[in-house]
């Protein structure tokens, strides 16, 4: 993970570029930050723990430089301390690094024998030392970079400064994203073009095993053998809306509240002209099976799709966590379509799984939110969700946009393979057109969610249960609560509790449940009775007409199976939000997390 920026200018102070870039890259991590720049022929390094704002406080208005590098960190090797924060300086070389040097122990051992000693617990300091080692050997930074590339295993996007060279920045890349943007008398290195769009939208994308020498007027990109490459200059033309919280206390709340719109925006191209528009969805009838791959919330969206594909369209569908998919026998087949789901389009595990499918020449489809992100260039075909930019680390509107896209994909398949009649498909489309009227009243039940939050926010353990689709939704509910409130919450298939976990249910343990399946509801209610009998407090989200006073009931409207998940999740999101708000956690940037998980 981590975000890196480097900037060089002929005549302007680059510190504002570095700070703006870092702030925009905080979605990649925010546990510590640092900057290194030349001032009066000397490299000055400032590092802090915590967010970029803490770094800003350490930089005075008088500080100025025309060349520098900066970093915002998500700790992998070594705690989030000032000493472990980047930049790391070893000998003549100062670097910022994103990625993981997998053979760092081996390199450390070799360098220790050559007299190097280390101050930090990071793999990045070892990378700096290895670059310095070869720099001293060849007295040539390019040769040093090429040797580094031969030796270092794992992933890296590195930007570096060399002592006594105020005219050049260098950068190198393998498996972690890196771009070099160019402007009038200045150039910027960054993890992501969107982070520096305030300054320029023209950029080069570095590919694996490429490096560059960057000065204020020239960018020279080479491959690992030192051959100069003629790379395409790209232009980022997508809208880059300034994002503010508006009157909301947190981005997460704003994003939850935007969902009637973002679901509608995602659905409209496929519903506005009835069946004709639905049939612009990719035709899946040529495949025997569908595999879905994603992480976290995106994986949960995949589980909803599995239910729809298997139960409604009678099509075999498996869903995999990307981090597992990579290392198992997937019985790859050209008759299987693999769908990759990602908000960011940058998640390392999902990208690696996608590369695996591609290397076997097998078909892939992306459901991705961020335009021009790495995955969009790798998939055979991409369906863009229209969630807009999601700033809060906990995903809400991206999830409902993913579920919307997958539901419509399953619906189009049901039409094509005739598992649903045209009349039934039209009914669903009609409900999709009415989605705002179903969602808005649920978003408005603030008092109910706040009163539940008050009852549960001091608890240590909370269980989420359900059956079928309701179980899949409970997984997303439990994830939302734990990531922002830090309360231990787990989802279980309702029928599974009695096979072990019910031993943890005691007096007042909150059990949150959704029951929206007429056939399964009686069974789920029996499971609720079982936990009630052990003293649990039950909160039930349902579209059924229960009035048992032992249950705290949150009613949701009756809806088609393709729409239902979009309704069930709203109370779960808002209960998580208000619970975290009562606990006073940093809701938009919860501890230990990052918005984009770019390491394996
Ligand atoms: C949870 C959350 C994460 C992401 C996961 C995948 O709220 O946001 O679980 O869903 O890291 O990220 P993307 O969708 O960017 O691949």
Image (spheres, rainbow, N blue to C red):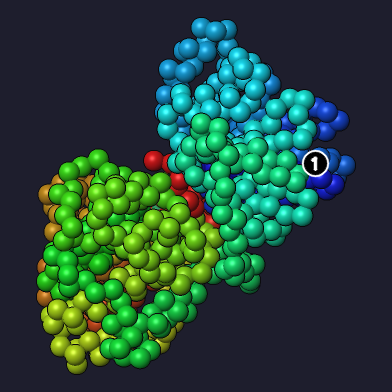
The answer to whether any part of residue 35 appears in the image is no
Residue visible at 29% across and 47% down?
359
Q: Residues within 10 Å of mark 1 (few under 14, many from 20)?
A: many
Q: Is residue 479 above or below residue 177?
A: below
Q: Using residue 534 as the reference point, say whether residue 259 is left or right of it.
A: right
Q: Quadrant of residue 41?
A: top right
Q: Using residue 10 as the reference point, say whether residue 47 is left or right of it.
A: left
Residue visible at 59% across and 51% down?
204
On the rendering, which quadrant does ligand 1 occupy? bottom left
The answer to whether any part of residue 334 appears in the image is yes
Q: Is residue 35 above or below residue 339?
A: above
| Numbered marks: total | 1
Q: Which residue is mark 1?
A: 66
Return the residue nearer the eye: 441 or 160. Answer: 160
Q: Is residue 457 above or below residue 141?
A: below
Q: Position of residue 401 (x, y in %)?
A: 40, 71
Q: Using residue 260 as the reference point, say whether residue 461 is left or right of it.
A: left
Quadrant housing the C terminus: top left
Q: Quadrant of residue 51?
A: top right
Residue visible at 73% across and 41% down?
215
Q: Is residue 21 above or below residue 77?
A: below
Q: Position of residue 357 (x, y in %)?
A: 27, 51
Return the residue nearer the eye: 398 or 349. Answer: 349
Secondary element type, mark 1: loop
Label 1 within 8 A of ligand 1 by Cβ: no
Residue visible at 58% across and 12% down?
117
Q: Position of residue 379 (x, y in %)?
A: 36, 59
Q: Position of residue 191 (x, y in %)?
A: 57, 47
């Amino acid at each position: 993970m981590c975000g890196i920026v480097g900037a060089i200018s002929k005549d302007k102070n680059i510190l504002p570029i570095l700070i703006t870039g870092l702030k925009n890259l905080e979605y990649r991590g925010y546990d510590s930050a640092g900057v290194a720049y030349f001032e009066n022929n000397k490299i000055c390094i400032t590092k802090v723990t915590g967010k970029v704002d803490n770094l800003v406080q350490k930089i005075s208005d008088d500080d100025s430089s025309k060349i520098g590098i900066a970093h915002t960190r998500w700790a992998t090797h070594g705690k989030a301390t000032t000493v472990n924060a980047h930049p790391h300086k070893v000998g003549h070389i100062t670097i910022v690094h994103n990625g993981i040097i997998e053979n760092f122990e081996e390199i450390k051992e070799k360098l220790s024998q050559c007299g190097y000693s280390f101050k930090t617990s990071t793999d990045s300091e070892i990378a700096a030392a290895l670059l310095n080692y070869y720099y001293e050997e060849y007295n040539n930074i390019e040769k040093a970079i090429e040797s580094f590339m031969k030796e270092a295993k794992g992933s890296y996007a590195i930007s570096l400064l060399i002592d006594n060279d105020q005219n050049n920045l260098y950068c190198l890349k393998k498996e972690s994203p890196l771009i070099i943007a160019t402007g009038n008398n200045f150039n910027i290195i960054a993890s992501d073009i969107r982070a520096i769009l305030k300054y320029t939208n023209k950029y080069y994308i570095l590919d694996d095993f490429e490096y560059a020498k960057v000065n204020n007027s020239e960018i020279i990109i080479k491959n690992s053998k030192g051959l100069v490459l003629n790379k395409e200059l790209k232009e980022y033309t997508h809208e880059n809306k300034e994002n503010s919280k508006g009157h909301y206390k947190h981005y997460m709340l704003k994003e939850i509240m935007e969902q009637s719109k973002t679901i509608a925006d995602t659905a409209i191209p496929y519903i506005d002209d009835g069946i004709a528009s639905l049939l612009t969805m990719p035709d899946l009838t040529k495949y025997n099976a569908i595999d879905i791959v994603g992480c976290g919330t995106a994986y949960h969206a995949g589980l909803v799709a599995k239910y729809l594909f298997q139960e409604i369209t009678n099509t075999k569908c498996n869903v995999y966590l990307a981090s597992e998919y990579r290392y198992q026998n997937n019985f790859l087949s050209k008759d299987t379509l693999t769908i990759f789901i990602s908000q960011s389009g940058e998640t390392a595990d999902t990208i690696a799984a996608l590369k695996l499918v591609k290397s076997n020449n097998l078909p892939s489809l992306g459901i991705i939110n961020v335009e021009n992100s790495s995955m969009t260039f790798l998939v055979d075909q991409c369906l863009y969700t229209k969630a807009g930019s999601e700033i809060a680390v906990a995903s809400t509107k991206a999830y409902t946009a993913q579920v919307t896209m997958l539901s419509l994909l399953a619906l189009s398949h049901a039409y094509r393979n005739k598992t649903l009649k045209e009349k039934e498909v039209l009914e669903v489309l009609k409900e999709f057109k009415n989605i705002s009227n179903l969602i808005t009243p649920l978003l408005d039940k603030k008092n109910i969610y706040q009163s539940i939050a008050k009852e549960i926010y001091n608890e240590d353990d909370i269980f989420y249960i359900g059956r079928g689709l309701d179980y899949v939704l409970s997984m997303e509910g439990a994830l939302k609560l734990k990531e922002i409130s830090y309360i231990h919450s787990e989802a279980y298939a309702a029928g599974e509790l009695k096979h072990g976990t019910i031993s943890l249910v005691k007096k007042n343990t909150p059990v949150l449940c959704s029951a929206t399946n007429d056939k399964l509801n009686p069974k789920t209610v029996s499971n609720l009775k079982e936990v009630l009998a052990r003293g649990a407090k039950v909160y039930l989200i349902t579209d059924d007409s229960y009035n048992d006073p032992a249950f705290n009931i949150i009613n949701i409207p009756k809806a088609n199976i393709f729409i239902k998940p979009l309704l069930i999740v709203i109370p779960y999101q808002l209960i998580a939000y208000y619970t975290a708000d009562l606990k006073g956690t940093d809701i938009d940037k919860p501890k230990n997390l990052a918005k984009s998980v770019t390491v394996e």
